[in-house]
Image: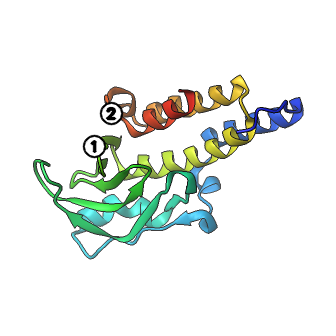
Amino acid sequence: MSETNQDPDVLAAHLAAAHRALTADLAELAVPAKAMLFHAPNTGERLQQILAPLARWGVPEIENFGFTTESHGTLVKEADSPGDSFLRIGTYWRWGIAVTGQGEVRGLQLDEWPEVFVNSSIEAFVETSWRWYYTWLEAEQMGWHIECFDVVDNFLEYAIAKDPRVGLEERSLWKMVVESWSG
């Protein structure tokens, strides 16, 4: 981020765009050219329904956090994981992103990073990912102005309103992402 002074009109434009990122319809935000779409493997109808938002909207390509999809998913059984296998749908930041049979999205351990909660549903994950993408783009351009941190905090408020467990879980991916900005 830049530490230079920013024109008040430019800053106001970034604030307006960040507000739009949290209030616009998903159809306005999910741009096919920026989306990484996911095609569900040939599995049961219930899993197809759970994964439908990923096939329809995809998730944004966020290079700095290294989100990459596994375009058809991989069924995995994580060591020390109780219960069913997960469908691994990609990698996001420091975690393997996977969907449980109940549709919850988890960040599975890669290297020494512990498992984290991501979202209660694929729908919440897709929508929150798109909104983070646009919030992040604006925050990056704002420099070290206090408003930048307000924008990032507003995103976390949105993420918690969309999926209250984001705020309740001790190890929440979205809380960690925001905390990485605010130190």
Q: Is residue 176 left or right of residue 33?
A: left
**Pointer 1: residues within 10 angstroms few (<14), some, or many (20+)?**
some
Circle 2 residue: 171
Q: Which mark is residue 162?
A: none
**Pointer 2: residues within 10 angstroms few (<14), some, or many (20+)?**
some
Percent x, y of residue 25:
60, 48
Percent x, y of residue 19:
68, 36
Percent x, y of residue 2:
75, 37
Q: Which mark is residue 115?
A: 1
Name the amino acid, label 2: Arg
Name the amino acid, label 1: Glu
Q: How is the image coloured?
A: rainbow
Does residue 26 lie above or below 37 as drawn?
above
Inspect this view and state whether residue 117 appears.
yes
Give yes or no for contact between labels 1 and 2 (Cβ–Cβ under 8 Å): yes
Q: Is residue 122 left or right of residue 152?
A: left
Q: Is residue 5 left or right of residue 37?
A: right
Inspect this view and state whether residue 119 appears.
no
Residue at 44% from the left image edge and 67% from the top image edge: 55
Residue at 61% from the left image edge and 39% from the top image edge: 22
Percent x, y of residue 86:
22, 58
Residue at 49% from the left image edge and 45% from the top image edge: 128
Q: Secondary structure at mark 2?
A: loop
The one of 112 and 144 positioned closer to us in this rendering: 112
Does residue 91 lie above or below 72 as drawn?
above
